[in-house]
Image (tube, rainbow, N blue to C red):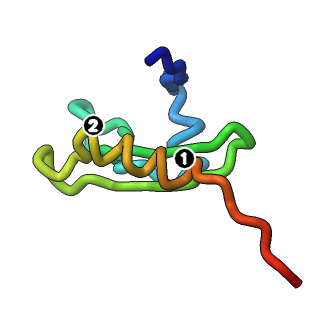
Amino acid sequence: MNHQFDILSDPGAQVIRSYGLVHRGAGTDGQDIALDTTLLVDVDGRERWRHVSQTLSDIPTTEEILTRIRETTKPVPNSKP
């Protein structure tokens, strides 16, 4: 399988602020840092799934993330009026 995905670098913290994922003052020198979050965003920029981890053991596994990707990319059947 050959899949491509983007990884975000956000040194100015603009993106984490726009998603409400800032842990204010929690950095080593009191700076704002990102909450430990796994975020699935579709090609249109819409958030499809979010998991904010409370601990390291709460971070989703690779299989959990792949399951969420599969669930959010399933074709939606045409609904009848």
Residue underneath mark 2: 62
Q: Quadrant of residue 79?
A: bottom right
Question: Residue type at mark 1?
Answer: Arg
Q: Residue furthest bottom?
A: 81
Question: Of helix, strand and loop, which one carries label 2?
Answer: helix
Residue 14 on image: x %, y %:
59, 36
Residue underneath mark 1: 17
Q: Earlier in the sequence, mark 1 or mark 2?
A: 1
Tell me: 48 left or right of 66: right
The answer to whether residue 11 is seen in the rendering is no
Nearest to viewer (mark 1 / mark 2): 2
Residue 50 on image: x %, y %:
44, 55
Crowding at mark 1 (Cα within 10 Å: few <14, some 14-19, many 20+): some
For the point 44% across and 18% down, the residue is 1
The answer to whether residue 65 is seen in the rendering is yes
For the point 49% across and 54% down, the residue is 71
Q: Residue furthest right?
A: 81
Crowding at mark 2 (Cα within 10 Å: few <14, some 14-19, many 20+): few
For the point 53% across and 23% down, the residue is 5
Tell me: 45 left or right of 16: right
For the point 42% across and 49% down, the residue is 22
Above or below, 4 against 21 in this view is above
Q: Nearer the viewer, residue 16 or 78?
A: 78
Question: Of helix, strand and loop, which one carries label 1?
Answer: helix
Disc 1/disc 2 C-alpha distance (Å): 25 Å
Question: Residue type at mark 2?
Answer: Thr
Q: Nearer the viewer, residue 33 or 51?
A: 51
Residue 60's tag is none
The quadrant in which the C terminus is found is bottom right
Q: Nearer the viewer, residue 12 or 10?
A: 10
Q: Residue furthest left?
A: 57
